[in-house]
Amino acid sequence: MPVLPSGLKVAIYKDHILPPDKNWFKAPENHFWYWTPAPENPPPFKPSDVWEATPATAPIPKTREEMKQYIRVVISLPDGKMYWEGDFMTDFPFFRELSDEDIAAWKTWTEREDVGDFLDHGIAQCVEQYIANQQAQGFVVSTVRDGEVDYAEKEIVPPDAGFKRQ
């Protein structure tokens, strides 16, 4: 996590890319799933904001540059917590002003090999998710026992198998 000359601490984040899971919906050919802000609640976000996400698909990135458009830039608060204003690596800084020194330091940091490795891992994660996703059934269900939904036993089943859809 770089600390820019102004003292601003930033980090990059990719946990909004869904993990490989067959208990989800198929994406189009060579696409992956990720969470994006719901259209009715777009960025920028403040640290106190609660925002809803919606799933979206996109083509699997082929290069580090393409992957950057799916990597979020998060901001560190004084208490060490992080939040996302809405910026991605490709457009940072979009929702805030930075000095020329901060921008230069950010660009230098993004060219480091460990950042490149992070981007490569993101591409591999998208590919892995796509491969697993090819076996997806298209809906998520859970068992109902004594009128209570049992979230611990999620499984994929045909719609007519006596399970309740979520």
Image: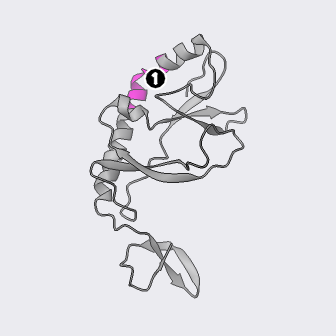
Colouring scheme, one of rainbow, by chain, secondary structure, one colour: one colour
Name which residue lies at 47% across and 53% down: 55
Viewer-nearest residue: 87 or 80: 87
Q: Where residue 166 appears, x then y in whole percent?
A: 51, 72
Boundaries of the magenta span: 108-117
- Residue 62 is left or right of residue 92, and the answer is left
Q: Where residue 20 appears, x then y in whole percent?
A: 37, 55
Image quadrant assignment for residue 75: top right
Name which residue lies at 58% across and 86% down: 147
Instruction: Indicate whether 59 appears above or below 22.
Output: above
Residue 124 belongs to magenta span:
no
Residue type pointed to by label 1: Thr
Helix, strand or loop for disc 1: helix
Q: Where residue 61 appears, x then y in whole percent?
A: 33, 38
Instruction: Indicate whether 151 appears above or below 114.
Output: below
Instruction: Indicate whether 166 appears above or below 79.
Output: below
Single out the residue that lies furthest toward the front. 40
What secondary structure prevails in the magenta region? helix
Image quadrant assignment for residue 1: top right
Determine crowd level at label 1: few under 14, some 14-19, many 20+ residues with C-alpha closer than 10 A. some
- Residue 4 is left or right of residue 65, and the answer is right
Single out the residue that lies furthest toward the top. 101
**Residue under label 1:** 110
- Residue 4 is left or right of residue 120, and the answer is right
Residue 112 belongs to magenta span:
yes
Name which residue lies at 60% across and 52% down: 52
Q: Where residue 36 appears, x then y in whole percent?
A: 51, 47
Name which residue lies at 42% across and 32% down: 68
- Residue 150 is left or right of residue 60, and the answer is right
